[in-house]
Amino acid sequence: MGLFTKDIKSLDDLFVHTLQDVYYAENQITKALPTMIGKATNAQLRQGFETHLRETEGQIKRLEQVFEMHGHKPKAVNCPAIDGIIKEANETAGEVADKEVLDAALLAAAQAVEHYEIARYGTLVAWAKRLGRDDCAAVLQQTLDEEKATDQKLTALAESRVNQKAA
């Protein structure tokens, strides 16, 4: 099923499809983070990735909760966007020999992931509210807040240390 097919007839259908999309994305992120942890040489960056891996596992549980609250079984649909972001991150990391530049590349890739997630969760929160599902919106908002906080931490780390060392 493509994103805009005849199977999506309502905002509710689109909401569920986007839940499935982000559910796939979060699961792919949990598979990608251990590689990023292993490649990171900056201790704070590595620790940040480890923390985010644990957060992502919690976010998956929250998504499963939202599926159930909304009367659906958790299901993933392919998300070409996250696949592309992860593929690009892996390709870039494979091309960087300098460890400090590699840390900057890993950090930038992590922020691309965060920005994707912020966009998706922000949309889901808005749609849940529009659908009268403030209960779902509240659960999704928790994840949105975590994603924004992670992005802010990555920005601070990039600006204070990682980018300086890479330069």
Image (cartoon, rainbow, N blue to C red):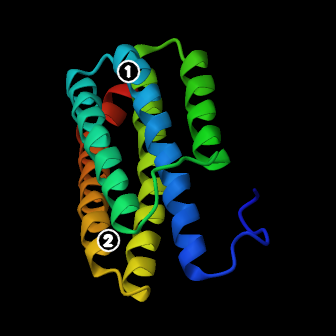
Name the residue at 63% across, 24% down.
Answer: 91
Q: CA distance from mark 2 to mark 1?
A: 29 Å
Quadrant position of residue 106: top left
Name the residue at 52% across, 11% down.
Answer: 97
Report the front residue among 9 and 158: 9
Q: Quadrant of the N terminus?
A: bottom right
Q: Secondary structure at mark 2?
A: helix
At label 1, counting other C-alpha atoms closer than 10 Å, the crowd grade (few under 14, some 14-19, many 20 or more) is some
Q: Secondary structure at mark 1?
A: helix
Question: Where's residue 135, x and y in %?
Answer: 26, 75
Name the residue at 45% across, 50% down.
Answer: 74
Is residue 66 shown above or below 49?
Answer: below
Report the front residue among 155 and 75: 75
Mark nearest the camera among 2 and 1 is 2
For mark 2, what is the residue? 136
Q: Amino acid at mark 1?
A: Pro
Report the front residue among 92 and 130: 130
Q: Which of pointers 2 and 1 lies earlier in the amino acid sequence?
A: 1
- Would you say 40 lies left or right of 102 here? left
Is residue 9 shown above or below 155?
Answer: below
Question: Where's residue 31, x and y in %?
Answer: 45, 27
Question: Where's residue 7, x and y in %?
Answer: 73, 69
For mark 1, what is the residue? 34
Report the front residue among 148 and 163: 148
- Name the disc covering residue 108, or none: none
- Would you say 43 lies left or right of 28 here? left
Residue 159 visible from this viewpoint: no
- Would you say 7 lies left or right of 47 here? right
At label 2, counting other C-alpha atoms closer than 10 Å, the crowd grade (few under 14, some 14-19, many 20 or more) is many
Question: Where's residue 129, x and y in %?
Answer: 36, 84
Quadrant position of residue 10: bottom right
